[in-house]
Amino acid sequence: MKGLLFYVLYLIIGSYAEREDLSGKAFTFPKQTATDYVKITLDDKTSLTALTVCLRFFTDLSQEFSIFSMATLTHHNAFLLYKEPSGVYGGHINNLSAKFFGLPVEVNEWISTCMTWNSKNRLIQLWVNGKHSVKKPVGNNAAIHVPAIITLGQEQDSYGGGFNAHQSFVGDITDVHMWDHALSPCQIQNYITHASFSPGNVISWKALEYVKQGSVTVEDIEINTCEKPGLL
Ligand SMILES: *[C@@H]1O[C@H](CO)[C@@H](O)[C@H](O)[C@H]1NC(C)=O
């Protein structure tokens, strides 16, 4: 009887242990490679007709780099966000692209970014820190068909692979969330300013299932909780 109880407890705890709360932590990508990345898999056989992805990154890269790469079986650039050396940001939905000009390009500070897309109006919009882009049209109103593979640190040129070191990310990435709808401007503002927001309902940084490859590490980044020296 006792054995059975422990077995049931083991099953319950075991199934939760797959998901990790990464609050206060970041993935650190220490070097330019074609082999270091974090992989997140979306298995549900659903169609996504709208999406928002938010994350924060910290880098000193001036070359091109991938910020968020999601591939499906039919589209390697199903949902892609990257930055060009000129400081222009690029977004792809189902292989169709838009470029965003005049957004913040600072290095060596945390950049909070969100990209929204809605198949109804076929528009994507990018938010970077306090600024947002104009809304840009991307192609037809097709949905993104899951299953999908998401890679952080590398840009996919095939489903789950086709990496190129010259498009890799070096630095830290944290607070990755994905929602199956376009967040409102107020909700995005709350994310960007670290006010309270509801975690992603497709991907949540508070319950992330992921696989780490190569020399990627998980590091503490929380600075609000540093111990203050006591008064004497
Ligand atoms: C999307 O782009 C990739 C790479 O260029 C290509 O191999 C793939 O066939 C494209 N998918 C569609 C549906 O056009």
Image (cartoon, rainbow, N blue to C red):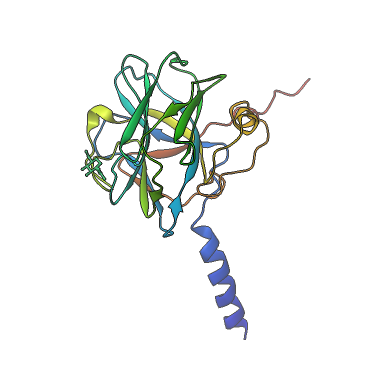
Placement of 64 over or under 184, stated as above or below? above
- For image coordinates 70% across by 23% down, the residue present is 229
Q: Pinpoint residue 109: horizontal percent, then vertical percent.
A: 49, 19
Q: In which quadrant is the C terminus drawn?
A: top right
Instruction: Please report the residue visible at 65 percent of the width from the left and 38 percent of the height from the top.
Output: 197
| Residue nearer the viewer, 173 or 136 | 136
The image quadrant where one finds the N terminus is bottom right
Q: Nearer the viewer, residue 122 or 45?
A: 122
Relative to 119, residue 138 above or below = above
Would you place residue 68 above or below residue 12 in this image? above
User: Is residue 23 found left or right of 51 in the rendered image?
Assistant: right
Identity of the residue furthest to the bottom in this view: 1
Q: Is residue 177 left or right of residue 197?
A: left
Where in the image, quadrant-wise, is ligand 1 located? Answer: top left
Q: Is residue 170 visible?
A: no
Q: Is residue 116 left or right of residue 93?
A: right
